Image: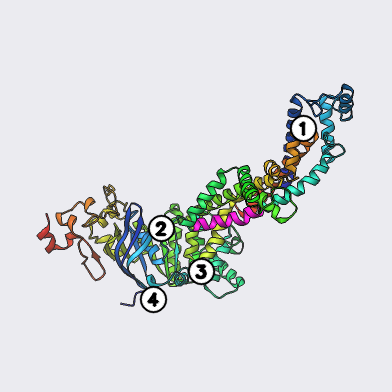
Amino acid sequence: MASYLLKRILAMVITLWFVITITFFLMHAIPGGPFSSEKQLPDEVLEALNEKYHLNDPLYKQYFDYLGGVMTFDFGPSFKRVGISVNDLIYSGFPVSAKVGGMSILVIILMGIPIGIISALKQNSPTDYFVTIMATIGVAVPNFVIATVIIYIFSSRLGILPSHGLTSWVHYLGPVVSLSGFSLAFVARLTRSSMLEVMQQDYIRTARAKGLDEGVVIFKHALKNALIPVVTYMGPMIAAILTGSFVIERIFAIPGMGKYFVESVGNRDYTVIMGITIFYALFAIVMILIVDIIYGLIDPRIKFSD
Amino acid sequence: MNKPLLEVKNMKTSFYTHVGEVQAVRGVDFHIQPGEALGIVGESGSGKSVTAMSIMGLLQYPGRVKEGEVFFKDENLLKKSQREMMSVRGNQIAMIFQDPMTSLNPVYTVGNQIVEAIVRHQKTSKKEAREKAVEMLRLVGIPSPERRIDNYPHEFSGGMRQRAMIAIALSCEPSLLIADEPTTALDVTIQAQILELIKELREKLDTSVILITHDLGVVADVCSRVIVMYGGLIMEEGEGGDIFYRPSHPYTVGLLKSVPRMDKAEKQRLIPIPGTPPDLVKPPKGCPFAARCPHTMKICLEEMPAYTQISKTHRAACWLLDKEKSERGGE
């Protein structure tokens, strides 16, 4: 187990290095820079700025300097927000994104899995049809449409939900619903189909032949097997949702990481692009590692081979 | 004759599917005495497994027992609620299945799956149940059971898994064990071991056994009495000697000709039975075997023959045995 973890962590470092390198050179390969804008800056100013941020250095030097910074978890200063470092942006943006994301994840797990189970157990009943239809809609409608519809109906027409900001718990309703819509529907469908498949297995018949209560058959024997594919989906999903949705944060004017990320790309704010990309990548790989470990806990057939 | 342990009377089971009512079992009568081993043979689709599932109350939607009675220790199992059946299943009637590779839950240890059955039916602590589970594993011939009890099913071989299934089934000392094709998925040497184990435990624990199989050799080895099923009906019933040496139904004769025999000196060709079993959505009006029978007469296609009692233990349903009627309506 220990050497398995060590191997995985080494692989994570290599993955991150690829992410850094590819992002860095692609970003610099695009013409223009952080300080090229429609209003041309005077040459001396531009020169001074480039000098200050080491943009005149040869690219390989910039690259190694940047790598050195990353090693010490210093993502450098933002080029566009004077006096603010990328670390500051992550510290201020991530908790906001994580709060909205965390609630969405709770909603997805606490509603998606039970809905899927109920739907499977009542296969071909009106409940099942209702769930299947809602889940198909949930998967098909993009989150920005859900967000816009919520704002239009509940904020603009009915005036019962605030349209922006995050100052009270009511503010969370809109973003959380929009953010969880797709995954909630997806998890419900996944749980349903997985549960249906498992309920057909021979070991379920064995469990019933032992005279076990239907509750034990479902929650002990079926559920643990049925959750294996759901857990697989969960890892990348949690990473994606916790680190914030660019679109949702934009629509509801939430000061999360997603918003900074979109702005930084538009602004060519090199360090912010890099910093947030690395943070997101790191988060995603860690979540996948956690999922793999949980996987091994659920399914004894999976061995952590060294 | 003693009071039978289990008595099935005119049981009919159907599956209500979108293509129509599949009449899997069309009225079967049989009984089993305490401590007896009864074999049910027949090819795929003859209704033998459905008969077992009906007795256990394990039929899944859209299957339903539509008629008949199943008396077990003087109680009609078909009248019992699901909740009442739960304390019969695994406790008084236990069952093992065809494929041991998929019959155990892969995510729990073998021990967990035995203990669970014991705790469900007997008032014992977890610790006592575990001791009992070790004892059961030893009884079914698992080496070093104290250690193997904490293994997961994938760490067991096929034969060991079937042994573990038998340990689960017998852990609550049931009076009846239904074994549905218990050796079909195992290779031949393991088959013999599992059959030997079933035979040995039946004597040791005084459990009645219903052995369902398509393999006549298996039945001859274990069972004292045999039922031959075809098209959801019992074609012939008798003691081992009746069936193997004095078969009276052309279907039984056909089955015997299609398996190799060691007791005949001269070389024999195996003769398959041509054709396939009948469609049970629209079962034939007459004898279900008429379409494949070498002796078919006109009356066979029109009317199902009644059982002819050949001896005290031996009966068969065939017009050939009903001299009077077949001569009048036959040819």
Q: Relative to A246, is A176 above or below? A: below
Q: Say what amino acid the circle numbered 4 marks.
A: Lys
User: Could you say where residue A282 lies in the image, as x and y percent from the top left?
Assistant: 74, 42
Label 4 crowd (10 A; few <14 / some 14-19 / many >=20): some
Labels 4, 1: front one: 1
Q: Find disc 2 in the rendering and name its residue.
A: B181
> Could you tell which of marks 4 and 2 lies nearer the N-terminus?
4
- Colour pattern: rainbow
Marks 3 and 4 sit apart, C-alpha to C-alpha, by: 20 Å
Seen as rendered, the residue at the extreme left is: B328
Q: Secondary structure at mark 2?
A: loop
Label 1 crowd (10 A; few <14 / some 14-19 / many >=20): some
Q: Which of A227/B147 is in front?
A: A227
Secondary structure, magenta segment, majority class:
helix
User: Could you say where residue A297 lies in the image, as x and y percent from the top left?
Assistant: 64, 54
Q: Find disc 4 in the rendering and name its residue.
A: B73
Q: Find disc 1 in the rendering and name its residue.
A: A267
Marks 1 and 3 sit apart, C-alpha to C-alpha, by: 72 Å
Q: Chain of mark 1?
A: A
Q: Which of A33/B331 is in front?
A: A33
Q: Which span is picked out in magenta?
A: A105-121
Label 3 crowd (10 A; few <14 / some 14-19 / many >=20): many
Image quadrant where residue B221 sits: bottom left
Marks 1 and 2 sit apart, C-alpha to C-alpha, by: 71 Å
Residue B14 among those drawn in magenta: no
- Is disc 4 in contact with disc 2, using a CB cutoff of under 8 Å? no
Q: Looking at the picture, do discs 3 and 4 lie on one chain?
A: yes
Residue B171's disc number: 3
Residue A288's disc number: none
Labels 1, 3: front one: 1
Q: Relative to A274, is B257 above or below? A: below
User: Could you say where residue B329 lies in the image, as x and y percent from the top left?
Assistant: 11, 58
